[in-house]
Image: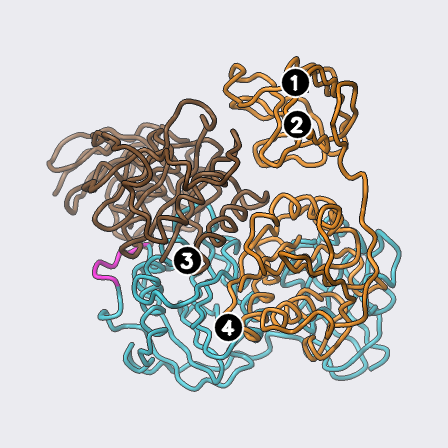
Chain colours: A brown, B orange, C cyan
Amino acid sequence: MLIVLLTDFGNRDWFVSVMKGVILKINPNVNVIDLSHEITPQNVKEAGFILWNAYKFFPKGTIFVCVVDPTVGGERKIIAVETKEHIFIAPDNGILDFVLSEVDILKAVYVENKDYFLENVSSTFHGRDIFAPVAGYISRGVDLSELGGEAKLTKPENLFVDVFNLGDYAGEVIYIDRFGNLITNIKPKAEIDGEVKIKEYVIEKISKTYAEVKSGQLVALINSSGLLEIGVRNGNARDLTKAGYGERIFLKVKKI
Amino acid sequence: MLIVLLTDFGNRDWFVSVMKGVILKINPNVNVIDLSHEITPQNVKEAGFILWNAYKFFPKGTIFVCVVDPTVGGERKIIAVETKEHIFIAPDNGILDFVLSEVDILKAVYVENKDYFLENVSSTFHGRDIFAPVAGYISRGVDLSELGGEAKLTKPENLFVDVFNLGDYAGEVIYIDRFGNLITNIKPKAEIDGEVKIKEYVIEKISKTYAEVKSGQLVALINSSGLLEIGVRNGNARDLTKAGYGERIFLKVKKI
Amino acid sequence: MLIVLLTDFGNRDWFVSVMKGVILKINPNVNVIDLSHEITPQNVKEAGFILWNAYKFFPKGTIFVCVVDPTVGGERKIIAVETKEHIFIAPDNGILDFVLSEVDILKAVYVENKDYFLENVSSTFHGRDIFAPVAGYISRGVDLSELGGEAKLTKPENLFVDVFNLGDYAGEVIYIDRFGNLITNIKPKAEIDGEVKIKEYVIEKISKTYAEVKSGQLVALINSSGLLEIGVRNGNARDLTKAGYGERIFLKVKKI
């Protein structure tokens, strides 16, 4: 059994480790691994995007525990969602949107049954007191229906700019990775060529690899997650363009 | 079997990973996980506080290996301590103080028996050459009494400012977490209300959750470890107050 | 079975985690641990040096997966190398040089057989699409000869400045660790004493431990990997000397 943790807790404090301790106390045989803990504090959308890039590569049965939770202790609910392949536990704050937009939900519940929480639930650290023990019990076979009442979730739409045809599209930078690559929400459904504009920069074609342009030059390509991405060969597109999250991107599709 | 590592080695160099290699060579069946490796270099007290926040959530039998060791290669000794629930291996430099202040010691020894060290012990990397192999052998069942002579440890006292009654208390910031929350050594023994002062700031009540104050405002609450903590809702109390480790905190308890 | 990952992917994005997902999908019973993911982006030599410091401490049979790969998607090949103790999978870009300089190669092949890749291989993320699945299959027992044709590798030489005799030696800083210690490529074959120069600083002896000099002073010693290292007791030699990678070091051996 595999539990994957995604939080904005960082790797310096004890928060992540304590979640692992709680899980392993409940199920010593589960394998707990990290997706990321370096989410920008309280950036729910960033976490959701990272999850979307990763989840489909994990084994059937993997339990994802997502704790980016700016309203912990407030009114927000916690949901557990079962799909054909995986289980997700998360605050009901949109963090699962990217994933839910493309999976079939088999079961979704609110996590309410205190039998599966730690005995004393703090108002500030539900990762330790609720998320971790619930994940531990699910990994031992507890069915989602035992956790609480059914959650009616609506399938999020239009999170990506789908590209099917020739023409003009506009999107934005939704993630910047360690290498400074600018990842956009533009999602071509087939191989395309065209022109990309960001700020004052124009990139005249869609490349297949970084190697197609000279060192230091901007390159546009469809990345390993199927999204339009802007990079710099042997360089850093964020530093070069000074683009940030939300920067507008314009694509003119000339060939598809 | 579970071994938990706590060091100031960081996650970039090979130091942590090599410790895992040494442990897994001795006991391939042990599960090795990280508590934190981002301790401020050589900050023994910070490491001890992180350990205190975490250890009680780990399964019975967990072995904690703590290597924040500014005097490695000098005269300092290494101790191994067994409590009812856990085993701790650490330099005898105070890193275990917070834990030892609240547990019953069943057995404590100096780690001296070279049979359980790597063959060549360097003078600068005891994490690899002593701590890791000793932890590996303990996880295979070696009793602490085989490691060396008895260590007489005294129970540290007064590490926290315990709050039992109405009145005035003074404490200090002992940890600042990733979110900029200021964690103090003030430890109420019951639910309290009162007034908190730090620098020129006055916080007029003790809240239960961040949600009780407005976005951007200072909030005082009893945190998930039972300590008085000062935060900012959707913000960063360190950045706002410019407080650092050791900053004085004043609490007037008005209701208990 | 143990798989060790070494990349420049960082710990924030999904890249490392996805590799683990792919591996565990192929072999749920393998133990996947991290060597480092904080390699300076695209710094092949730094990664190779970290690997050299670590590999010999890992159990027989450990599979090292090394993905620092500035020319991914270009012409570079991927190699898999089997030694008496370990298996290494890496781009054929020099990352294995330090290791190959001191091991006997039993088998070396180019990784070409698409049967062991993910179905769709992207041009930018071979870590996920090639390295991870190949490692997963090797951990299940696939022989290197099934991966592709024999690779003829030459043993790299003169990566270190070996010190056998009295006299003058020149080397350079090849790594700076978290503590600011300057690690050089000078490798004494026996216990030595002598004088070390770096920039305008002269260190008059080789110490055994940091404790031999006063707090704040420069100290030269033979480190836990057998290399000449320059540090500052309770301080940071990089900050004090402003030395960087490649800084020249001069050693006059007076006693051996």
Could you tell me which residue is drawn at 74 percent across and 27 percent down?
B164
Name the residue tied to disc 2: B190
Say which of marks 1 and 2 sits in front: 2
* Residue C236 located left or right of residue A155: right
Name the residue tied to disc 4: B28
* Residue B103 located left or right of residue C103: right
Could you tell me which residue is drawn at 63 percent across and 54 percent down?
B6
Image quadrant containing the N terminus of chain C = bottom left
What's the amino acid at mark 2? Ala
Would residue C123 be counted in the magenta stretch? yes
Say which quarter of the image contains residue B126.
bottom right
Q: Chain of mark 3?
A: A
- Dot 1: element: strand
Say which of marks 4 and 3 sits in front: 3
What's the amino acid at mark 1? Asp
Q: Are marks 4 and 1 in contact (CB under 8 Å)?
A: no
Q: Are marks 2 and 4 in contact (CB under 8 Å)?
A: no
Q: Are marks 3 and 2 in contact (CB under 8 Å)?
A: no
Q: CA distance from mark 3 to mark 1?
A: 41 Å
Name the residue tied to disc 3: A30
Would residue A212 be counted in the magenta stretch? no
Q: CA distance from mark 2 to mark 4?
A: 45 Å
* Residue C9 located left or right of residue A141: right
Q: Nearer the viewer, residue B139 or C227?
A: B139
Structural crowding at the residue carrying mark 2, measured as other residues with C-alpha within 10 Å and reported as few (<14), some (14–19) or many (≥20)? few
Say which quarter of the image contains residue C19.
bottom left
Q: Nearer the viewer, residue B144 or B71?
A: B144
Name the residue tied to disc 1: B193
Residue B161 location (% of width, % of height): 77, 32
Q: CA distance from mark 3 to mark 2?
A: 36 Å
